[in-house]
Amino acid sequence: MVDVLTPEQRKTCMSNIKGKNTKPEVLVRKIVHSMGYRFRLHRKDLPGKPDLVFPRYRKVIFVHGCYWHMHNCKYGRVTPATNAEFWKNKRMSNVERDKNIAKKLIDLGWNILIIWECETKDIDNLTRELTGFLSIT
């Protein structure tokens, strides 16, 4: 499929993508906060600067974008037609980095939950998943 945006428009669009405080991340925060849990954001002293950190429980939550972290859903399986090799390498390096970060956190004694962007569409299921993860100590 041919890109409907000009290269300049695509560049602007891609440069506006945020790494923190994304809509899915803020949604997860609101749900967890409404459940009565308190957390820290993006702790720089932990590998990967997890999105939500629960020091008391030694648990962290990452909220991953399906496209950027190559989730096995329809959003994560998209392959760009333009500059395909660059984007494939970029996304694969994200996946490898995620694996390394998870291993480091586990080695440090932390429990990890990854919430995918597509999972934030079903609030009830997301709430059950978060409740299960946070209630087990």
Image (tube, helix red, strand yellow):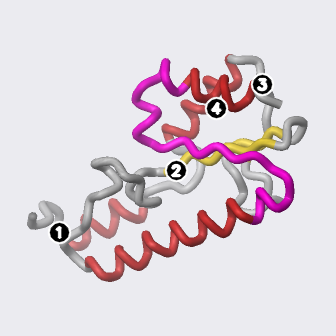
Question: From the viewer's perspective, is the residue at label 1 or at label 3 nearer?
Answer: 3
Among the 4 quarters of the image, the one containing residue 13? bottom left
Q: Residues within 10 Å of mark 2 (few under 14, many from 20)?
A: many
Question: From the viewer's perspective, is the residue at label 4 or at label 1 nearer?
Answer: 4
9 to the left or right of 123: left
| Label placed on residue 64 | 2
Q: Which residue is mark 3?
A: 37
Could you tell me residue 63's position as x and y percent?
56, 45
Q: Residues within 10 Å of mark 1 (few under 14, many from 20)?
A: few
Q: Residue at x 64, y 32 (%)?
A: 29
Helix, strand or loop at mark 1? loop
Which amino acid type is marked by label 3?
Answer: Tyr
122 to the left or right of 10: right
Could you tell me residue 51's position as x and y percent?
67, 47
Q: Is residue 35 magenta?
A: no
Could you tell me residue 73's position as x and y percent?
33, 48
Which amino acid type is marked by label 2?
Answer: His
Specify the segment rendered in magenta.
104-126
**Mark 3 touches mark 4? (CB < 8 Å):** no
Q: Which residue is mark 1?
A: 6
Q: CA distance from mark 4 to mark 2?
A: 14 Å
Q: Is residue 123 magenta?
A: yes
Q: Is residue 61 above or below residue 5?
A: above
16 to the left or right of 13: right
**Mark 1 touches mark 3? (CB < 8 Å):** no
Which amino acid type is marked by label 1?
Answer: Thr
Q: CA distance from mark 3 to mark 4?
A: 9 Å
Q: CA distance from mark 1 to mark 3?
A: 45 Å
**Mark 2 touches mark 1? (CB < 8 Å):** no
Q: CA distance from mark 4 to mark 1?
A: 36 Å
